[in-house]
Image (cartoon, grey):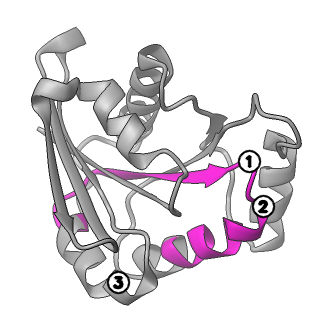
Amino acid sequence: MFKVVIGGTKGSGKRSFIKTLVGKENLIEIRKGKTLSLYIGTLLGEFGLEVLVISLPNEERFSEFWKVCAKGSGGYILLFDATKRQDWEKSFKMYEFLSKDCKVPFLFALTKTNLNGASSLKELKEFLEKKGVKTDLIRELDPRDRHSCLLSVIYLISEVEKKGGEIKC
C-alpha cells in the first residue's frame, strides 16, 4: 500500500482532497477541539491503486505529530492556497521540516486557482525557486474534483516509480 501525506494551511483543501479522493464512506475524521483535525482515508483497488492518505494538522506546534503521521509514507502532496499568498510561507515551513528527515518526493499543488485574485502556478514556481526548491513536481489541483485528485496521486506515485520503486520515509 502506498501512503501519501497531505499538508497545507487551514482552508487549503486537505479535507476536501481526501474526501473527494476516497469517498465519504472511506474517510475517518478525528477532531480535537478547534485546532487539531486529522483526516485518514483509503483508496483500494481502483485503477489498481492501494493508497492510504493522511492529512497533517496545519499548525507548526504539531510538528512532532507530523513526523509520526509521515512515518512510512511514500510521498507528500503539499497544498498551497492560490487566494492566500500570505500563507505560502507556512506551507513552506512544513516542507522544510518534513524534508529534513525524509527524502520522499513532494508534489506541490496550487488550489483555488479558479477564484478571483488567485495567484498562478508560475508564481508558486517562482516562490519555490527563490527558496531553492526543485519544482518539477508542481501542478494545479482542485480538491473537489476526483479526477484532479486521482491524477495528483498517480503523478506522485509515478515519480516514486521513476526513482526505482519503494521510497519510504
Q: Nearer the viewer, mark 3 or mark 2?
A: 2
SS under mark 2: helix
Identify whether 89 is placed above or below 107.
below
> Which contiguous range is marked in magenta?
70-94
Q: Nearer the viewer, residue 80 or 19?
A: 19
Q: Residues within 10 Å of mark 2 (few under 14, many from 20)?
A: some
SS under mark 3: helix
Q: Residue at x 40, y 37 (%)?
A: 16
**Residue 126: x, y in percent?**
86, 57
Question: In which image quadrant can residue 100 be found?
Answer: bottom left
Residue 82, label in figure: 1
Identify whether 133 is placed above or below 15.
below
Label 2 sits on residue? 85
**Residue 128: x, y in percent?**
74, 63
Q: Amino acid at mark 3?
A: Ser
Q: Quadrant of the C terminus?
A: bottom left
- Residue 115 shown in magenta: no
**Relative to 36, is 14 on the left or the right?**
right
Residue 63, label in figure: 3
Q: Residue at x 23, y 27 (%)?
A: 22
The answer to whether the residue labelled 1 contacts the one labelled 2, judged by CB atoms less than 8 Å apart, is yes
Disc 3 or 2, which lies upstream in sequence? 3
**Relative to 158, is 131 on the left or the right?**
right
Q: Nearer the viewer, residue 16 or 52?
A: 16
Q: Amino acid at mark 2?
A: Arg
